[in-house]
Amino acid sequence: MININEVTETNAMIEKENLDVRTITLGISLLDCVSDNLERLNDNIYRKITTVARDLVRVGRQIEREYALPIVNKRISVTPVSIIGASACHSVEDYVSVAKTLDRAAKKVGVNFLGGFSALPAKGMTASEELLIRSIPQALSQTDNVCASVNLGSTKTGINMDAVLLMGKMIKETARLTAGRDSIGCAKLVVFCNAPDDNPFMAGAFHGVTESDQVVNVGVSGPGVIKCALESVRGADFGTLCEKIKKTAFKITRLGQLVAQEASRRLGIPFGIVDLSLAPTPAVGDSIAEILETMGLEKAGAPGTTAAIALLNDQVKKGGIMASSYVGGLSGAFIPVSEDHGMIEAARCGALTIEKLEAMTCVCSVGLDMIAVPGDTRESTLCGIIADEMAIGMVNQKTTAVRIIPVAGKGIGETAEFGGLLGSAPIMAVNQFSCEDFVSRGGRIPAPVHSFKN
């Protein structure tokens, strides 16, 4: 039974500690939209999305009002478009037309982002996947709400270095085409190793082919809640610290489960997963870096940071899986620089570097996220950074990702402004030594020996 203390505690989390449901993401399969005629394909896609998602925003707002719980984003993910468009799309322009259809549908139903302009060339690249990848710069520069992702490797298949090399070029071109807005197109583009099929968070969300026709996934956040909980155990031993994080994560996840089940019931669409990810915002008090500092670090990036983020990630997951039988996605702690004011400050004062962030990605939920680098950064350097991060995911059997923004016309020490939840980012230095001869070899880095489990 729920008692008055639990009600009061939850209200305090919402009012004072920035607790929110970060997103309700409606996954929609577009497999039944496939056609060899481009006009018919676009019509099918628009009709399917605007029909299935017509009540998503209304239901989200209803739940917000009735439960007095902020639901920040209502979003859609769709089947990777490289699969859906394979029969009808024979040029870059064809895929751009599909991106525009997705954008039009997203605006019609009122969601802020739609993910799934995606390709999955983890082992090899089909002609359709290559075309979609080459269309990404135009697609993201000519749409507002569409997000793109590409899965470049996995523990079972290794790393597709041909696709890595191509993505380095596409990231630079996306930055160039959106230069007037601090290269914001790159903020809507992420590359993965071991991409999950049920991720509700942008920019990497897509509706995996293993999923049902429609599904409701919910992403819950709450860095501010965890930080406030840890204030009460300053100086305590690690056992006490872990228990406090775990119990707090349990409470947050239960709230997410409630919202997910309500949204599922009202929409008449099956519930998929709750993703408990501590996803920060630019607001003060809603920061992963502040959690690390409450644990005892002077600044995020100080020695001990990787151990602290490992502890945090593990306890969040342990608390979450006790609260719901269907925890999935990318549950754990995100470390996007531009979206976390504490990370921004740590980067500005030199405590946090790309190399330290890379070390932290070995134990956090995703990877190098929302990192701004100089606009003149070489394509090969971007490819090397991506390859390093893919290797961490491949060898450690975890999801890793890179969302890096070479901000056109800006250099180290300047700031890129993206606005809203995307925040702002200080331009960080990158290693200037070349990796061009390495990344341009082509082919595939083989899967590690421990991938052979059959």
Image (tube, helix red, strand yellow):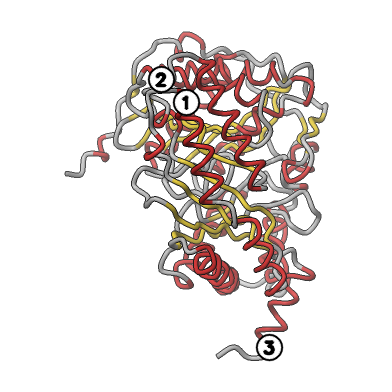
- Residue appearing at x 50%, y 65% in the figure: 264
Determine whether the residue tagged by mark 1 lies in a helix, strand or loop. helix
Q: Is residue 349 above or below residue 432?
A: below
Identified by mark 2, the residue type is: Met
Residue receiving disc 1: 387
Q: Is residue 57 above or below residue 5?
A: above
What whole-number distance in Å separates the C-alpha atoms at marks 1 and 3?
49 Å
391 vs 184, left or right, is: left
Q: Quadrant of the C terminus?
A: top left
Please report the residue visible at 67 percent of the width from the left and 24 percent of the height from the top. Answer: 142
Is residue 238 visible in the rendered structure shown here? no
Mark 2 nearby-residue class (10 Å; few <14, some 14–19, many ≥20)? many
Question: What amino acid does circle 3 point to?
Answer: Asn
Which numbered disc, 3 or 2, marks the residue that appears first in the sequence? 3
The reply to whether dot 2 and dot 1 touch (C-beta < 8 Å) is: yes
- Residue farthest to the left? 454
Q: Which residue type does callout 1 highlight?
A: Ala
Q: Between marks 3 and 2, how big is the CA–CA gap?
A: 55 Å
- Within 10 Å of the Cα at label 1, are there few (<14), some (14-19), or many (20+) other Cα atoms? many
3D distance between C-alphas at marks 2 and 1 = 8 Å
Looking at the image, is mark 1 or mark 3 nearer the viewer?
3
User: Which residue in the structure is indicated by mark 2?
Assistant: 161
Quarter of the figure with the N terminus: bottom right
Q: Which mark is residue 5?
A: 3
Residue beneath the point at 44% across and 20% down: 89
Question: Could you say whether the residue bearing mark 2 is in a helix, strand or loop?
Answer: helix
Q: Earlier in the sequence, mark 1 or mark 3?
A: 3
Residue 170, which numbered label? Answer: none
